[in-house]
Amino acid sequence: MASAALSPSSFLGPLSLRHGPHGPRGPHSLRRPRLQVRADQATLPVLSFSGDRVGSASLDLRSAPPSTARAVVHRALLTDQQNSRRGTASTLTRGEVRGGGRKPYQQKKTGRARRGSQRTPLRPGGGVIFGPKPRDWSIKINRKEKRLAISTALSSAASAADAFVVEDFSHQFQAAPRTKDFVAALRRWGLDPSHKAILLMTDLPRNVWLSARNIGTLKMLTPRTLNLFDILDARKLVFTRSALDYLNDMYGNNNVDSDDYDDDESEENEALPDQQADAVPEGGEGESSDGTS
C-alpha cells in the first residue's frame, strides 16, 4: 500500500531540454515529463455477511508506473491537505495593536534602553513580528492527475491484499441499527476493530450509518466523499459490489472520459491555432507572436 510519508522533491523528476538551454524556445524550455499511466488488474475475494467466501471480483484500474507513482500520489495528497487549510490565522503588528502612541519615557538621562512605544514586539502585549495574516493556501491540480493518484492508491492496496469485497448487507440492519452486530460482522470479515479501515458504499442507508458511526477506526465513504488521505490512512479497504463497479467505471482502464494522457498535450497544441484565431474579433488586431500589437 502506498505510504503517506512522501518527499516533495520526488515530484520534480527529470526535466528535458528542447533545442539546448537557449534554443528556439528560449530559456523557458524546461518541461515536466508527460503523465504516464498503466493498467493494473487485481482479483479481490468476495465475502458474504457471515464471512464465507462466495466468489471473486476483478478491480481493473489505471495506475501510474512505479517510477512516478510515489510522486503523483504525493502531489495529490499535498494538494488535498493544503486546500483544506482555512487560511484565517491573523496577528496584529505593532502598528495595529491598540495603544502605544505615547513615548513611555524620555530618550536620554534614564540609563535605560531607548523606547518609542509600549507596543513594541519586545514587550508583552506588543505586536507580532512577521506574524501570519489571512491568505489563500489553495493550489491547483489537474483533474486527470488527481484521479490517477486515487486509482494508483487503490491499485496499490488491492495488489497488497489489503482490499476485499462484501455482498450487500443493508437488509441485515433494516429493522434497527445494531453496532454490536456490525462489529461482529467486521470480525467475521477478518477486520480488527482497533485498526483503521474504510467501507465504500454507493448508497449508505441510515441504519447502517447509525450502526457504524460509533466505531472510531471505521470510515463509511461514498463516491462523493472518497478521498486520497483516507485511502492511504486505512489498513484495509472494503467495497460493496456496487462500489466496485463504480470504481471500475470511474477509474478503470475502459473509462470513456479518460483520454490518452500521452496524447493530451499534442491535441491541445494542435487546437491552439484555431482557438487563437477564434479569439480575435472581426476587424480587430490581434497580438503577434513576438508580444507586439
Image (cartoon, rainbow, N blue to C red):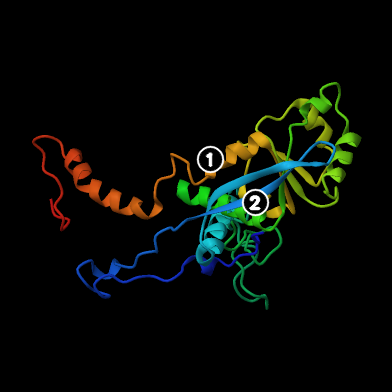
Q: Residues within 10 Å of mark 1 (few under 14, many from 20)?
A: some
Total tally of numbered discs in the picture:
2
Which residue corresponds to the image point at 83% horizontal and 41% vertical from the top-left?
Answer: 51
Drawn side of residue 1 relative to residue 279, left or right: right
Given the current orientation, which residue lies at the most extreme right position? 180
Residue 144 is labelled as none
Drawn side of residue 92 relative to residue 176, left or right: left
State whether residue 137 appears in this view: no
Which residue corresponds to the image point at 19% horizontal and 47% vertical from the top-left?
Answer: 273
Residue 124, percent from left and from top: 71, 61
Closer to the camera in the image, 47 or 286:
47
Residue 272, percent from left and from top: 23, 47
Asked if residue 116 is positioned above or below residue 279 in the image, the reply reads below
Closer to the camera in the image, 146 or 248:
248
Please give the residue where the numbered disc 1 appears in the rendered image. 250
Please give the residue where the numbered disc 2 appears in the rendered image. 229
The amino acid type found where label 1 is placed reads Met
Labelled pair 2, 1 in contact (Cβ < 8 Å): no
The amino acid type found where label 2 is placed reads Phe
Q: Residues within 10 Å of mark 2 (few under 14, many from 20)?
A: some
* Disc on the earlier residue, 2 or 1: 2
Which residue corresponds to the image point at 54% horizontal and 61% vertical from the top-left?
Answer: 69
Drawn side of residue 264 relative to residue 226, left or right: left
Callout 1 secondary element:
helix
Residue 265, percent from left and from top: 33, 53
